Amino acid sequence: MKNCLLILRTFIANKQIGLKYILIFFGIIFYSIAHGQTKTDAELYATWKDKSNSDGDRIKAYFDRLNVWEIFENGAKLDNKWFVASDKAIELALKLDKKEYLPLFYLASAFNYAMIQTDFARGCIEINKVIESAKVANASKFPVFIAYTISSSACQADIKEEDIINEFNKIKNGIGESCIKISNILDEINKEISYHSTKYFSSYRTLDLTEQITKLIHHNKIMNERILLINLV
């Protein structure tokens, strides 16, 4: 969230939001971060493992859990249960024709074979599948960039430098897109606050900004991941 503090500070200065609304704003965000994320892994894994759920819900939970750059960062700690389940996730994605999930799932599979099973040759095969599957569809922002860098170094593949730069630029451009989305949400919040202040007994009414705050947290999370990835290059 720190990467958008400047935007928020400018927003507050220009719109002159009351202190109590700022406290509400930060209170909702920090409560969501402190109490929401602790359940994320367990909840998503429960959805993934429960075969009474639809296959679509299961692989969506799998995708949501792994679609975070830090999980694949060197030294990151994540229960191996997610990576060893990659073969099943790939099977379901193919069955449901969810091609956009495959690049991320193949990256998890490459991690499984190379880092857990120490089968580096198979890991390189899976890395190549990340690149090939992304040519068809890709719902995640970082698997191809990671696959290019691993493929060119660990797998000794002939990857063009311009391809790596292009993937890097996609991530870099995404930061600007995220900031625009965050700025638009803050404007939306201001309109809600302004309208709320016109109501009778507004100081005694509760202003519901849950939807906007949820979107704000989502886009800030995406932007932070992209910034982290660029900083590691």
Image (cartoon, rainbow, N blue to C red):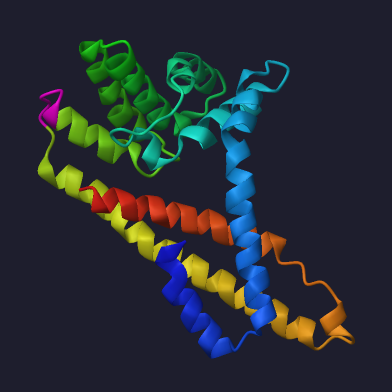
What x and y, as percent, mark residue 2? 43, 64
What x and y, as percent, mark residue 155? 15, 23
Tell me the residue at 21%/12% (across/down).
121
Answer with left or right where residue 85 lies relative to residue 122.
Answer: right
What x and y, as percent, mark residue 146? 27, 36
Tell me the residue at 69%/23% (across/down).
54
Report how many numbered discs are placed on residues in the image.
Answer: 0
The relative height of residue 224 versus residue 40 in the rendered view (above or below) is below
Pick whichever, 42 or 14, lies toward us.
42
In this view, the residue farthest toward the right is: 200
The relative height of residue 111 versus residue 16 in the rendered view (above or below) is above
Give the main secondary structure, helix, strand or loop, of the magenta stretch. Answer: loop
The relative height of residue 106 versus residue 197 in the rendered view (above or below) is above
Is residue 88 one of those drawn in magenta?
A: no
What x and y, as percent, mark residue 186? 57, 73
Answer with left or right where residue 121 lies relative to residue 9.
Answer: left
Pick whichever, 109 or 94, lies toward us.
109
Tell me the residue at 81%/89% (across/down).
198
The relative height of residue 69 versus residue 183 in the rendered view (above or below) is above
Determine which quarter of the picture holds residue 52. top right
Tell me the residue at 19%/44% (across/down).
164
Query: For the magenta stretch, what is the residue range?
Result: 153-158
Answer with left or right where residue 229 lies relative to residue 96.
Answer: left
